[in-house]
Image: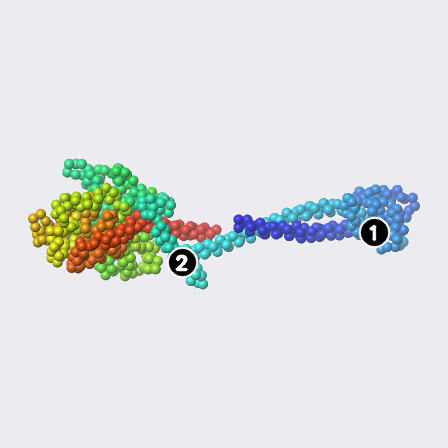
Amino acid sequence: MRISLRFILPLGIALAAIAYAVVPLVDRLTLQWFVRDLDTRSESIASAVQEPLAELVTRAGAKQKVQRYFDRLVQDQRIFALGYCDSRGVLVHSTYAFPKAVRCSGGGAPPARNRVVELAHGPIHVSAVPLSFEGEALGELVIVHDMSFVQRRSEDTKKYIFYLFAAIAAVVALITVVIAEVSWRGWVAGLKRVISGEALLGSRGGLKVTAELRPIARDLQALVRDLEAERRTRDEGQTSWGPEALRRILREDLKGDEVLIVSNREPYLHMRRKDNVIEIQRPASGLVTALEPVMRACSGTWIAHGAGSADRDTVDKHDHVMVPPERPAYRIRRVWLSKEEEQGYYFGFANEGLWPLCHIAHARPVFRAEDWAHYQAVNRRFADVVVDEARTEDPIVLVQDYHFALLPRLVHARLPNATVIAFWHIPWPNPEAFGILPWREEVLDGLLGSSILGFHTQFHCNNFFDTVDRFLEARVDRETFTISYGGDPTEVRRYPISIEWPPAALAAQPPVEACRRNVRERFGLPAEARIGIGVDRLDYTKGILERFMAIERLLELEPHWIGRFVFVQAAAPSRSSIDEYQNLEAKVRVLAQRINHRFGRPGYEPIALRLEHHDAARVYELYRAADFCCVSSLHDGMNLVAKEFVAARDDEQGVLILSQFTGAARELAEALIINPYDLEQSAAAMHLALGMPVEEQRVRMRSMRNLVQEFNVYRWAGRMLMDASRMRHRRRVVSRARSARLLSARQ
Ligand code: ADQ
């Protein structure tokens, strides 16, 4: 519309000017030229015929000769007509076509030598040339030229002139439109570049903003960032987060892009039992709980270490197996590790090195060079598998946890267009704590190969910024949460993990009273005993020993709970081949025994310790049976048990006691927040929980349930995917601009 107006308007004006000014002017000029030509021609004819004609007209009886002479002249010279007027002004001789309207001048009037006379059939040119013979004036020769050819030519000329000028006007209008359009687009594109920040890429991006535009560009960028953030928050807030929302993001924002997950642990293991039957296990892992719904929603590929005893027997020839078994929706690609590799990479560097390094739980990290070598080799192996599994050149690769700190850089090197999102599920320590790692630069460099690096809390993000600032020559921008280290920048963001809502395991649960009955029966608890629970992997970071000591303190301080209160601890054995974990198991057993011995009596033990993995239904039954749940981690990334407990309590009863050193404590403010090292405080919290009025429990629980419902795991994954989509969109725009620039530079 804008273009057609720009074209038609100037063209219309030009055509009108041609029609009303140019054409008449050209017409007049050509007429004048022709008349002048005819004047000259008439004069030269007159001077040529002067003498013979004078002789003839003065000779008596030569009338016929004059007539013939005139006829010949008319023919030879292509004259319309000729006439001779005598000195009295009488037409004496004339050719046949001599127009009547043309009169001799005579009568003493000075002759109008040349004139144009309009006749009915068109204009004629008339020249009257005086004749003399031997000094004596005779009469005048009248030469008539037909000017209709002038009119014809003039018509043609007008036509050509009109077409010529119209064509010129059209070309000029077209050029104007093109120039206007190009400069408009250039201006708009420039503004867009300024807004998007692309124009500030500088020498690397190749585009620059002049110095005077820089402040405007900065303001515009800040504005756009704010708007983007606001829109993100609004979109996020307005979305009802569930598997469908994730599917929509994958479909609409990511246009069905390929998604690969890499984690050490697989979501399903195939185990061969003693009776040779293969059974399927789901590991007790927060990570699996969080990512399974994403995979179900996008039907991607999950790459993981094949650790089950029957894993090799259940894959196809490409090491793939479809899961979940009851309703296959995505595939696992299993990676095989030797015993030495598993020992060095998993138990060694990851769990004896990085795990205690990142958790301030006072367990000393162990760093062995051979473990590090295995860790590097296994990371390289997984990078090979990612490249092997990728069906597109720009997949989204979700790298999970501290087992793969080097993987983002390795994947980025092989698939530079991939969007690598690394999520660090455990805390990130301060630079002093991290600084003892002998390969700290390598680990940081590996992680900075990610496009997005996620932590549970802003505190962990800040620790990471400080660490990079301390040990690498990198540009850390805390305003945009970005780190630039050599290659592409890495966005470091907070993505608090959560659980699915409503939890699948809740659907088949009986009412709370029935759960309580079942639990009492299963654990042999006294009929009226109040129940506290702990659900953890058996890990020294979870503060199980501190929890038991707090129970001991409770029973010391409030002995009326003896016999009326039982604490059920479900602890799934974990990393049992590591000394630290074996020691912990022994310590936990001994401490539970000691407390039970001290406060127990026939038919009653205050701590019911179950060192085993429980299936999800059993875990949820425990949550529902409890008066309180105690999460006393010494340090924890998030802690999903806290959120699961809240989700399990649709009766809005039960109290959550939560360590201040968990990520969850930043969100679940209505829990009783404790310092697990402070046994008095923890014991007081337990006492408070057991006596908390029903109404207060309801208010606290309702508020926490709202939060977990709203900020569920779909939102966690959705936010990462939305950020990935935004980033991919930006990169595409920048790369399009770069190719356009290269193209124009080449032309
Ligand atoms: P974990 O250290 O494994 O996760 P957590 O977040 O509490 O800790 O998740 C444990 C999961 O295992 C829960 O789903 C729980 O139900 C299950 N579980 C625990 N004990 C069990 C038992 N005895 N039997 C069966 N199931 C059991 C790491 C980080 C956390 C972070 C998660 C997710 O250490 O801080 O929250 O990843 O990012």
Q: Which residue is mark 2?
A: 223
User: Cβ(mark 1) to ligand 1 < 8 Å?
Assistant: no
The x and y percentages for residue 242 are 31, 46
Give, as a three-letter code, the residue at label 2.
Answer: Leu
State the residue in front, 680 or 588: 680
State the residue in front, 353 or 626: 626
Locate residue 545 relative to residue 474 in the image: left or right: left
Mark 1 or mark 2, which is nearer the start of the sequence? 1
- Residue at (82% x, 45% y) in the render: 99
How many residues crowd around disc 2 within 10 Å: few (fewer than 14), some, or many (20 or more)? Answer: few
The x and y percentages for residue 68 are 85, 42
- Residue at (38% x, 53% y) in the render: 231
The x and y percentages for residue 499 are 26, 48
* Residue 320 in which image quadrant: top left
Locate residue 242 relative to residue 33 in the image: left or right: left
Give, as a three-letter code, the residue at label 1.
Answer: Val
How many residues crowd around disc 1 within 10 Å: few (fewer than 14), some, or many (20 or more)? Answer: many
The x and y percentages for residue 681 are 17, 59
The local secondary structure at tag 2 comes to: helix
State the residue in front, 253 or 603: 603
Numbered badge on residue 129: 1
Q: Going by the picture, which residue comes out furthest to the right?
A: 60
Q: Nearer the viewer, mark 2 or mark 1?
A: 2
What is the spatial separation of the Cα atoms under label 2 and label 1, in whole angstroms? 90 Å
Locate residue 137 relative to residue 383 in the image: left or right: right
- Residue at (13% x, 51% y) in the render: 564
Residue 399 in view: no
Numbered badge on residue 316: none
- Residue at (83% x, 42% y) in the render: 96
Residue 313 in view: yes
